Every structure is written in structure tokens, then in C-alpha cells.
Image (cartoon, rainbow, N blue to C red):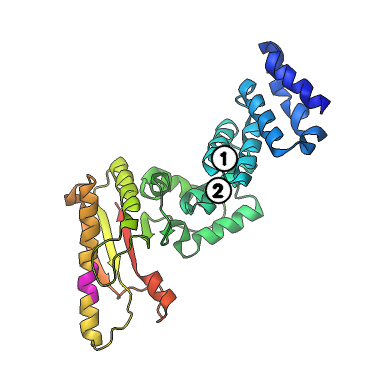
Amino acid sequence: MEKLILLFLILTISPFVIASQLCKNVDNFIYQSDDLQNASITEQKHLIKLTLQRCPRHAYSHNNLAFLLKNEGNYLEAIEHYRQAVNINSNLSQAWYGLGEIYDKQAQFSLSLEAYLHVCHQDKSKKKIMALLENHRYATTEEGEVLEKENLLLLYDKEQRQEMEQQIFDCGLNAKIQPVIIFRNLIFNPGTAKLKKSATQQLNQIAIALKQIAPTVIKISSHTDNQPLQGVSEEVHSYHNLKLSKVRADTIKWGLVAHGIPAKHIHIYGYGSTKPQISENSQEAWAKNRRIEIAVE
């Protein structure tokens, strides 16, 4: 540990000029040291934070601190340091991949896709990208998940969307990023157009994103399942679903209006069970087919 103790002293009391030279060679002082590998996680974090006090633009220190924080489950702070790392060194592949992993865990899948695209040359990243592109997973949110504003803007903001499409093209893949997001977390009480309280947070994030980009057209499409009802004919059931889906789309519309989105920009569509994503009768298929889709122009 003598080498680490010496480093503590240099970082703490050395003149600025000496510390500046140290910052240029901090990898040799710290990350190639056996002492660091043998130190506890707490000691490693303390040393890296001390290094960042004197070397705030050392990308690898931000990356390595983020890695430790990620493993502890401290995702917010880890994202902050990963972001600082790539802002300093945009080619730091470890930081981009670490960001992708955290966004995966948080179910912020378009952010995860965007992070992995920066390191598409890695086989493991390309596999992640292909999985996210499959079945529109990067733009789908399930029950219990909430897409944050930054995640929504990657798809709704034209410039960010086009930039991501260029990254996909450069990656050698053929896929278009559509400005439409599938929300399975905007859940209604069964057979009604009353939103559950769990939908409030997601509706708020959608409104924040839409106000930022101010689209001229917002299309809300509501879809129901085709779960059969006893004692009701198929024709009556189909008519009921069409009517219910339109009322549910209207509920989402006025929920957004209540958050400050102009009603004149919102168009609603109720498709009932006429456009299923999975054409089969099962609990899993019904859950997938019940959804709200919101697109912008």
C-alpha cells in the first residue's frame, strides 16, 4: 500500500504543476498498480474520487468510478460519471457500454440503444443493438416501466432520431427509427376508459417531452385485446371494443391537454382489436395487444 499512500500525499499537498503532470500519468500511478487491485472497493472509490478532485477531466477515472458505482446499484451517480467520461473522451468504449447496461436495467431502451450504437464495432454491443431493434423493443414500455423524458425525446425529436438512424446505418444494419412509442403501461381499469393511477407518472413524462419539441400533429392510437366475452356475439364484442378504444384514446388526449398540450394538435384513433400485434388467444397475447401508441409529426 506504500505506493497508494504516496499518491494520496501527492494528490493532497502537491503544487498544481506537479499534480498536472500526475494527471497525465495517472494510469501508471493508479490503474496499473497491484496495490489498487488488492484494495477494498471503498478504498478504490476513495482513491478515484481523490484523483478526480485534482484531475477532473481524467476520463478513465470517471469510467472506473462509474463501474464501481454500477456494481453497487448506484445507477444515477454511475450514469453521471459515465456521461462525464464520454464527454471528455467520446471514443471510450467501456463507458458507452456501461451506459447501455445501466439503461437496459432501467428499461430506458432507446437510451440503451443510443449508447450501444457508439460501440457497434464490438460484437457484444451489436448483439444488444439487434435485440433492441427486434419487434420495436427500443420503443416499447411494459407494465411497471416508465419511459423518462430523455428516452422519449430520442424518438420524438427529429434531429436526435435522424442521428440515431445514421448510427444504425454506419453499424451496417437496415432499420428505421419511427417516431412512435408503444405504451403498455398506460393501463385502464378492465372494460372502462378510466386510467389507473400507475399511469400518472408516464403521462407526465410524455407531456414534458411533447412540450419540449412542440409537434404539430400528435396521433394517439388505442388498441384492445380480443378476449371473448360470454353471452356476447362477436359482432357486438367487436363494436364494443372499437367504441371503448376510441374513448380510451380520448382519455389520454385530455390527460395530455391537462398537462398543457394543445388539444388542436391531438388526433385520436380507436382500433379495437382489429390490429393485434400477436394473432392468438392467450393471456400473453391479450396483454401484448392492449396498448396505446403515440406518434408525432
**Where's residue 9, x and y in %?**
74, 18
Q: Is residue 246 left or right of residue 49?
A: left
Kindly report the secondary structure that dominates the magenta region of the rendered protein: helix
Quarter holding residue 179:
bottom left
Mark 2 Cα within 10 Å, few/some/many (few <14, many 20+)? many
- The stretch in magenta equals 241-245
Q: Nearer the viewer, residue 222 or 286?
A: 286
* Residue 149 lies in the magenta stretch: no
Task: Check disc 1: other Cα within 10 Å, few if <14, some if 14-19, many if 20+.
Answer: many
Residue 98 lies in what quarter of the image?
top right
Name the residue that disc number 1 marks.
78
Q: Position of residue 127 (x, y in %)?
A: 60, 58
At label 1, which amino acid type do we have?
Answer: Ala
Q: Secondary structure at mark 1?
A: helix
Q: Residue at x 34, y 57 (%)?
A: 198
Q: Dot 2 corresponds to which residue?
A: 102
Viewer-closest of 222 and 259: 259
The residue that appears at 24% across and 51% down in the rendered structure is: 256
